Amino acid sequence: MALTTSKIVELLGKDADSLLKHKSTGIPKETLHLPGGDFVDRVFSTSDRNIRVLTNLQRIINTGRLSGTGYTSILPVDQGIEHSAGASFAPNPAYFDPENIIKLAIEGGCNAVASTYGVLGMTARKFAHKIPYVVKINHNELLTYPNKHDQILFGNIEEAYDMGCAAIGATIYFGSPESSRQIIEISEAFQAAHELGMATILWCYIRNPAFSTAEKDFHVSADLTGQANHLGVTIQADIIKQKLPENNGGYNALKFGKTSPLVYSKLTTDNPIDLCRYQVANCYMGRIGLINSGGASAGETDLAEAVKTAVINKRAGGMGLISGRKAFQRPMNEGAGLLHAIQDVYLDQSITIA
């Protein structure tokens, strides 16, 4: 059963008015390139992407419950590497089996499924033609002791092509000591993927211990994540994945880099929609779609949190959500229902761009 507007309002609770009635003025919606069924024609037809990349981008947009809207709902399940398999799948051991990951993405009406070489390779002949595959080519493995935080390549681009992937995904830890190497590696990987006709999705995360202070965690600052997005689109990511911003002023608090007072006085406010819109603006004013991550599962509040994130992303001008743990750490029917709830926000025409 589809999530009604009144149910969405109920789930937003005390935040309903500030999120559903807000109008962004710092970066007006008229200046954005917004999602739509014609997004590939309108935005990418003048780019240097080849015909096969455009075909795969259109295939992603035309799959699942959001088909034809220009919005995307992607199921990402690489947490078995990024957070350990035990931490990720113990709440629901069925997802140790790769086939159940793909089945959840299909049952959940997703536009695509993003996972590891192993998960997608094990299931490719059965499912790669049924739902777009996005192989995550690098990971932060956590078995090295003591733990280190670095994204390393787990395979090559030809392997992704051979298993029928529509796109590849990668993470760069911008701000980390290893970021220079990662930027070079992923720039080369994205070029190779485009040459073979696959689209590219970049997890534009920032990572540096100095970005977390006693007052705030500026890893989720709008100005720092916005700049990470801008670096990501520079290396020709076709879609940017970013954490939803929770604060602002990272540059000023940390006293490094360069920014402008206008970022804080004119372009943004404290409203989460405006903070997210600054992320969209850094994605070439929406020419490169912004998808925000769904975050960890917190149990009973997952549905409300997912709906709130979707409302913020949509009203900011984003392209959709990529939500994993909230979906796969529960029975499949409940996980599919949560994914449908996220999609219902994008299908609800009363929820407009702020």
Image: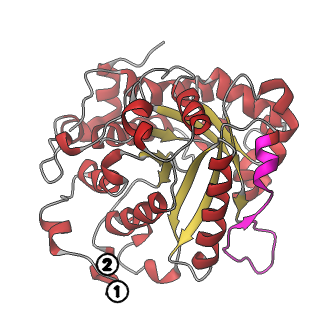
The spot of residue 186 in percent (x, y) is 63, 63
Left or right for 41, reference 177: left
Q: Mark 2 packing: few (<14 Cα in 10 Å), some, or many (20+)?
A: some
Disc 2 on helix, strand or loop?
helix
Q: Name the residue rendered at 37%, 39% in the picture.
A: 308
Asked whether residue 319 appears in the rendered view, the answer is no
**Is-magenta flag for residue 183?**
no
Name the side, left or right, on which 129 lies relative to 250.
right
Q: Residue at x 25, y 22 (%)?
A: 350
Q: Which mark is on residue 12? A: none
Residue 196 place in picture, x, y as percent: 69, 45
Query: What residue is pinned by disc 1?
Result: 256
Q: Nearer the viewer, residue 270 or 23?
A: 23
The magenta-colored residue range is: 141-161
Amino acid type of disc 2?
Tyr
Residue type at numbered disc 1: Phe
Q: Which mark is residue 251?
A: 2
Q: Are marks 2 and 1 in contact (CB under 8 Å)?
A: yes
**Relative height, residue 218 to residue 71 (above, below):** below
